[in-house]
Image (cartoon, coloured by chain):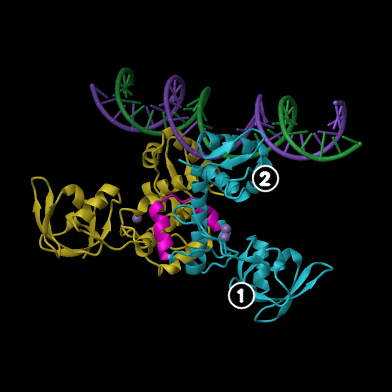
Chain colours: A cyan, B yellow, C purple, D green
Amino acid sequence: MVTLSEENYLKAIYHLGKQGSVAVSTNAIAEKIKSKASSVTDMVKKLADKNLANYVKYQGVTLTEKGRLIAALVIRKHRLWEVFLVEKLNFTWDEVHDVAEQLEHIKSLKLVDELDAFLGCPTHDPHGDPIPDKDGNYSPIKSVNILEIKKGEQGVLVLVKNSSDSFLKYLNKNNLALGDAIKVIDFEPFDKSLTIETSDRKMIISNEVAKNLYLSL
Amino acid sequence: MVTLSEENYLKAIYHLGKQGSVAVSTNAIAEKIKSKASSVTDMVKKLADKNLANYVKYQGVTLTEKGRLIAALVIRKHRLWEVFLVEKLNFTWDEVHDVAEQLEHIKSLKLVDELDAFLGCPTHDPHGDPIPDKDGNYSPIKSVNILEIKKGEQGVLVLVKNSSDSFLKYLNKNNLALGDAIKVIDFEPFDKSLTIETSDRKMIISNEVAKNLYLSL
DNA sequence: AATATATTTTAGACTAGACTAAAAATATAT
DNA sequence: ATATATTTTTAGTCTAGTCTAAAATATATT
Ligand SMILES: [Mn+2]
Ligand SMILES: [Mn+2]
Ligand SMILES: [Mn+2]
Ligand SMILES: [Mn+2]
């Protein structure tokens, strides 16, 4: 049995360390999970005892195959529920995360399978993140950060690398959504901002915003 | 903030004491929740501190208005999720309860509202139990136990007063489902069993089974 | 290489929720 | 009315998960 808390730690390690393959520091986990380093040390020992993590004192944590699969399945549930909330229950993409944080811990194999089928086996969540399959595998959409794109080229917004409330609300306010065609008009060396053009209009976005937008060409 | 555990106790008191209006004994709660009397005493004190229950030592517990509403809303969620699982995700009525026990604790007003609308504002769950509205009110279907019915009369199965796995599996095996028309053919004084007739066939059901079947005439 | 700084671990304490065993109160039976 | 049985409460213990403060280790700087 894996507890809710353990699932959250596994997920954090998975996200911070390239699916748990690269050693993650105690502090990094603490920050991600909004707990303290000492709590992380305790939990990480438990995960190691349960063969879900590899832990060497002072040298960070990685996930075992078992731990990696559990983390991937929690993320699978999280993202499937996000799709459900947006597609079926009229949630906007900035409203889904907190509810999905709760729903991802519901235990029922049949529930995940049937939900997946009910949604038409989606491959990506409302923020463009890939949905792992039953074995924990997934293939991200090939996409490139908007800052890497040449002036004059255009692409389709397929991924936002920041799902914070404030960022998503900013995008809403400025009428930017997944699936939008965006053309890069100009790059401003002074503040590294970008002028872009959508079907609606031209607009300037800060470097901070641009960093989080990924397009498929 | 009401914890998951507190919600479960509120629900138990609600179910055992006519929506929490009649005093419920410590032991009754312990049995329902599969805990021990001493644990119940502790929790009931906490509920009273939070103004969710009225508690007088040695005299049982009732719910306050606040406690009653919370309990009703948890039950609302439980039953809405049961409908969702059956109607949308191909669960059978004997598979939904355990998952609904988890889903009923998800906190999001919008989620409940939208789920309700998505399901077409159902009034009853897959076992015939009424679904409370946002204010915690509901009207049960007028139904009568099959043992009260006169020989030769018939009705429609609208409620089963036992949602245990074994009972529901028994009904499945014997092709009895909500909505079925059932006629009472004979009553056997020896063991108080009943002969009934469905669209398929005639069959004998034990008194134990009959006790749990409610028909609308 | 020695010292200063940052990170991580340990030690010890706290809370929620559960339990057992014993004590206290209530209910039942003579 | 008293003795017995049952129920409920209290007292004390346990576990999971968290925290603060201090100690240990690792990293960076001179
Ligand atoms: Mn999310
Ligand atoms: Mn997402
Ligand atoms: Mn149920
Ligand atoms: Mn039900």
Bounds of the magenta segment: A99-118
Ligand 4 visible in quadrant: bottom left
Residue located 30% across and 63% down the image: B141
Q: Quadrant of the N terminus of chain A?
A: top left
Give the main secondary structure, helix, strand or loop, of the magenta stretch.
helix
Observer-nearest of B68 and B120: B120
Number of labelled discs? 2
Q: In this view, does A5 lie to the left or right of C28?
A: right
**Residue B28: within the magenta?**
no
| Circle 2 residue | A28
User: In terms of depth relative to the viewer, which is nearer, B128 or A91?
Assistant: A91
Looking at the image, is mark 2 or mark 1 earlier in the sequence? 2
Residue B52 in view, yes or no: no
Q: Is mark 2 on a helix, strand or loop?
A: helix
Q: How far apart are marks 2 and 1 (CA)?
A: 34 Å
Residue shown at 61% from the left, 75% from the top = A180
Rendered image quadrant of residue B87: bottom left
Residue B154, given in percent of the width and then of the height, sits at 16, 64
Quadrant containing the C terminus of chain A in the rendered view: bottom right
User: Which secondary structure lies at badge 1?
Assistant: loop
Q: In this view, does B195 lie above or below A67?
A: below
User: Are the residues flagged by discs 2 and 1 from a single subunit?
Assistant: yes
Residue wearing tag 1: A180
Image vertical order of residue A185 relative to residue A191, above or below: below
